[in-house]
Image (cartoon, rainbow, N blue to C red):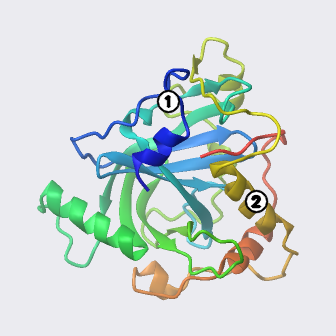
């Protein structure tokens, strides 16, 4: 995806959101933004090719390899979107509260990877893995550390746009079995909770021309529908399984279907986060 899609969805004469401008520095930063919109979700973004490659992760990332997190790829965002935290006002596209849940740097992983490789070599390796649908990387964040993989799902679900991935923690010294993301409801920038940010009238606000009420359209329609379909699947005992050794070791492994992942996530105990009516956006 490119910034053309980001631009198409916004009228910049009516919104102070950053324009769709590439960043020539091509850094290796990442950010996870917790977003209470149509549904509470987390936006996982990796800086690549002068933009932020972005995935909406309904249940958020995990440090437990047993958690195969569904991640819906959405349009690229400009790097200037990186540290936005605050409130998108009602009656705007993506209305809701946004928190910078985690941030730091990342690096691509491959068999011949070396810390001495140039930035251009690392960028090339990351781009190649992303194109193959098997992006292995290491995070150096305040909350997320260690090795992960983003694996594109080979879903045959009717209506699938091929944007469904899995975000999986690989087995290393940073694993935390039984990881509970709800215990980390605070911003790495302001140390505020999502509720505290929502109640802060002085928080930064980004306007948008898209409606926040009524039927969800465009980008959010397929995302909301996909998550809703997954949530409606019946509970299957024992659906949650540990990550295969081959996946944990970074070797090529077939990726489970969307239905299998949905069943796995449905078997996980419900979140202890306060239930609120939320809206979903990337």
Q: Report the residue marked by disc 2.
A: 225
Q: Report the residue marked by disc 1.
A: 84
Residue 219 image position (x, y, % from top left): 63, 50
Q: Quadrant of residue 24?
A: top left
Marks 2 & 1, CB-CB < 8 Å contact = no
Task: Kindly report the distance in space between the C-alpha atoms of the residues bearing marks 2 and 1.
Answer: 26 Å
Residue 107 image position (x, y, % from top left): 30, 58
Report the residue at 69% width, 32% height from top.
Answer: 96
Answer left or right for 4 relative to 217: left
Residue 256 seen anywhere in this rendered image of the structure: yes
Return the disc, 2 or 1, that comes first in the chain's sequence.
1
Q: Residues within 10 Å of mark 1 (few under 14, many from 20)?
A: some
Q: Secondary structure at mark 2?
A: helix
Q: Residue 279: give its label.
A: none
Q: Quadrant of residue 117?
A: bottom left
Q: Is residue 203 above or below residue 30?
A: above
Q: Secondary structure at mark 1?
A: loop
> Which numbered disc, 2 or 1, marks the residue closer to the eye?
2
Residue 15 image position (x, y, % from top left): 54, 23
Report the residue at 61% width, 70% height from top.
Answer: 68
Answer left or right for 270 relative to 169: right
The residue closer to the viewer here, 128 or 100, is 128
């Amino acid at each position: 995806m490119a910034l053309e899609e980001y631009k198409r969805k916004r009228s910049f004469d009516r919104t102070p959101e950053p324009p769709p401008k590439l960043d020539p520095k091509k850094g290796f930063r990442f950010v996870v933004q917790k977003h209470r919109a149509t549904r509470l979700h987390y936006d996982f973004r990796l800086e690549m090719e002068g933009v932020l490659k972005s995935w909406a992760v309904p249940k958020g990332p995990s440090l437990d390899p047993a958690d195969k997190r569904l991640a819906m790829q959405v349009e690229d965002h400009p790097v200037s979107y990186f540290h936005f935290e605050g409130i998108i006002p009602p009656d705007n596209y993506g209305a809701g509260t946004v928190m910078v849940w985690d941030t730091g740097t990342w690096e691509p992983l491959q068999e011949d990877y070396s810390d001495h490789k140039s930035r251009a070599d690392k960028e090339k390796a990351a781009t190649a893995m992303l194109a193959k649908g098997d992006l292995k990387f290491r995070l150096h964040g305040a909350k997320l550390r260690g090795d992960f993989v983003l694996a594109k799902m080979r879903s045959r679900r009717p209506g699938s746009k091929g944007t469904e991935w899995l975000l999986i923690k690989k087995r290393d010294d940073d694993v935390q079995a039984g990881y509970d993301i709800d215990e980390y409801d605070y911003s790495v920038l302001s140390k505020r909770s999502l509720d505290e940010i929502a109640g802060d009238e002085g928080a930064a606000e980004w306007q948008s021309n898209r409606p926040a009420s009524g039927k969800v359209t465009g980008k959010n329609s397929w995302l909301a529908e996909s998550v809703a379909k997954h949530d409606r699947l019946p509970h299957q005992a024992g659906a949650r399984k540990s990550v295969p050794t081959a996946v944990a070791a970074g070797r090529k492994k077939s990726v489970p279907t969307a239905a299998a992942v949905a069943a796995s996530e449905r078997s996980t105990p419900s979140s202890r986060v306060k239930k609120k009516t939320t809206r979903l956006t990337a």
